[in-house]
Structure formats: C-alpha cells, structure tokens
Image (tube, rainbow, N blue to C red):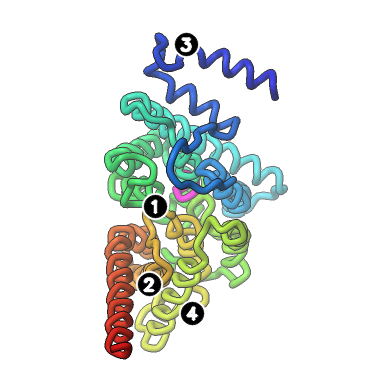
Amino acid sequence: MNALRKKLDQLKKPFAKGEKWEKFAPAVNAFDTFLYVPNHTTQKGAHIRDSVDLKRTMITVVIALLPALIYGIYNSGYQHFIQLGEQFTFWDAFSHGALKVLPMIIVSYVVGLTIEFIFAIYRGHEVNEGFLVTGILIPMIMPVDLPLWMLALSVAFAVILGKEAFGGTGMNILNPALTARAFAFFAYPTYMSGNKIWVSEASNIDAISGETLLGSLAANHEVHYSVWEMFSGSIPGSVAETSVLWILVGAAILIFTGVGSWRIMLGGVIGAAFMALLFNLWGVNALMNFPWYEHLLVGGLAFGLVFMATDPVSAAQTFKGKWIYGILIGIFCIMIRVFNPAYPEGVMLAILLMNVFAPTIDHYVIQANVKRRKKRVSTATVKSA
C-alpha cells in the first residue's frame, strides 16, 4: 500500500496548486479519495472527529444494495427462461441476467461520472461520492431491456438537471435516481410500460407475456402468483426491485449502521397498509380488492421506501417530519396505484412528490416545536411571578 501511495503522490505532482495541470486536480483527487481516506482536516473552530465520512456512507448503501442486485440479476434470467418454458440451471439464469444488467451498470457509471468530473473541473471543486449510489440505483429500477442509449440519456438528465443544476451532491431537491426513471418514463413511455418490457427479450417472442402483477390487476386480469413468490421476488418487474426478502436484508444493514431512517421506512409501510386496508373495505376493482398486505409485497414500494425515500438529502430531516414524510409516501403510492390504471406502480411519483414537500414538512415541525417552547417559557414566567 505504501508503494501505491507513493506512486499516486508522484502522479499528482503536475496537478498540484500552481502547477501546469492544476485545473484538472479534482479529477485526479477523485481516484485518490476512492482508494484512500480523504486527508481534509478542519483547521480552526469547533469540530467533531468522526470515522464516518460521505465515502463510507455511500459504500455502506452500495453494500446494502448488493443482495437485491444479485438476486435481480438472477431473476432477470429466471423470468426469461421460465417464460420460454425451457430447462435451465441457476448459472444459466444468472449468466443471462448478468449479460443484460452489467452493461446497464457500466453505462450508468461511465455517463454519470464523466458528467460529474466535467462539472467538478469546471467549478473547481472535488468530485463527490454521491454518484456511487446513484450510478447503481438507476439500472436497478429500470426495465431489463431498456436500450442503453435511453439509459445514458436518463442518467445525463438526472445528473445535470436533477443534481448539478442545484449545486451538486447535497443540494438536490429530488432523488436523482428517481429523476432518471421519471425522465425515461415520460420521454420513452413505450419502453417503460406495458407487458413486454419486464422480461428479457420478451418483445422478440409473441408467446411471452411479461406483464407485472400490478399491470395484471390494473387490466382486471387474473393474478397467478403466490404470496411467497411476491415476497421472494420471482415475478416480472424492474431489474432489482421485486424481492422484498433481499430488500429487507439491505434495510437491516442501513438501519444497523445508522445510514437509513427506520422512521421513514416504517412510516411508509404504515401509510401504505392503512390506505390499502381502506380500499379493501369498499373495493370496486381488482386493485382495490387486492389484499392490503400483498400491496406491500409487490411493485417498487419496498425498494423505494428503503433505498430512495430515505435519501438523506431529499428526505425530511426532523424525527417527526420523517414519520409524516414516510406515511404520506405510503398513502400516495397506494392512491396512485388504485386511481391511475395507466400507471399502477405509484411509488416513483409518491416519493418525488414528497421530496418537493419535505422542506415544508420540516419547517412546520420546527415551527410547532418553537411555539411549544415559547408557550412553556411564558407559562413558567407567569408561575414564577
């Protein structure tokens, strides 16, 4: 490691302050901080030493995403072969899925990081580690056969207009990964909805129907999946958002490390369960009659609550605000599912909507706290007098 450290220091010399290539220092420093702990220190004023920095936080989220991603790669191949009715092994399914998903991840990182590097050099600041998570999240919430050039445009839109236009990592109002999915959904609707996009190569074979469970319910078709299949994730859907089982493993990692907010996650479950149960009481269509607990197992609800609603930048920050924020996401997700058959998913729009209102929620929570404290002060003053 010492030899690598010395080599990196040698390579960085032409990019040091006052040297010929100083302008490109942020790009070089990005590779340095990816391999080593950043050596930035506070020189004056009160400060706290903490072993957790942005890079460690982002790496923790990536680790939490891996179980769902690995299963998603396998499920992409599994759905392909099971629809064909062919005999296949675990490695057949995993290999097929990897050939589809890994290029998506590569394109996402190459496009996104290139734009991040350009902005860092232009603005003269260091490259932030935020895209470590965004770059892997975007492919995970897309259909497996989305053309790579569409994915690239979606990533570019999310990074430029969803994040850099607001000042970069930590300044964005909307979750960047969901911004990419929203762009793809509205710009290329035929590639983001329907019953042929959720199964690999389904569009090439007439006999394959890759309709999602929610899509089937919206069209009043019969649902033939068991609760275990919904929970384990062996159903058609976006690349890595179908398995509640492995998403819960990721949730446990985020909660145990303190990176993800359990209040938002639990609040979302409570809100979704409450709204689904209300619809069950007077259901007039398949989505309303769908059991409330099964609503929690299908679509991108679980994935969205665990990995995107908890985004520390675009989510609510106060404890009470997190409860309100999470509950409203769950409520709106089920409402969009039931009332909009053309878009029976709902969680993407629900989270983006609440991203916009998160600062307002925090504002009123803080103001309520201020009023209560003022009231206690005035009461104490009257009693002492």
Percent position (x, y) of residue 19?
A: 42, 11
- Depth check, front residue: 181 or 254: 254
Judge from the rendering whether residue 331 lies leftward or rightward of residue 42; answer left or right.
left
Q: Label 3, on which residue?
A: 14
Q: Amino acid at mark 2?
A: Ile
Q: Which mark is residue 291?
A: 4
Marks 2/3: CA–CA distance:
51 Å
Could you tell me if residue 175 is visible in this image? yes
The residue most toward the top is: 20
Q: Main secondary structure of the magenta part?
A: loop
Dot in front, 2 or 3: 3
User: Which mark is nearer the camera, 3 or 4?
Assistant: 3
Calculate the distance from the C-alpha at mark 4 to the C-alpha at mark 2: 24 Å
In depth, the one of 65 and 124 nearer the eye is 124
Mark 4 vs mark 1, foreground winner is: 1
Residue 236 image point, x, y percent: 52, 57
| Kind of residue at badge 1 | Val
Indicate the amino acid at tag 4. Pro
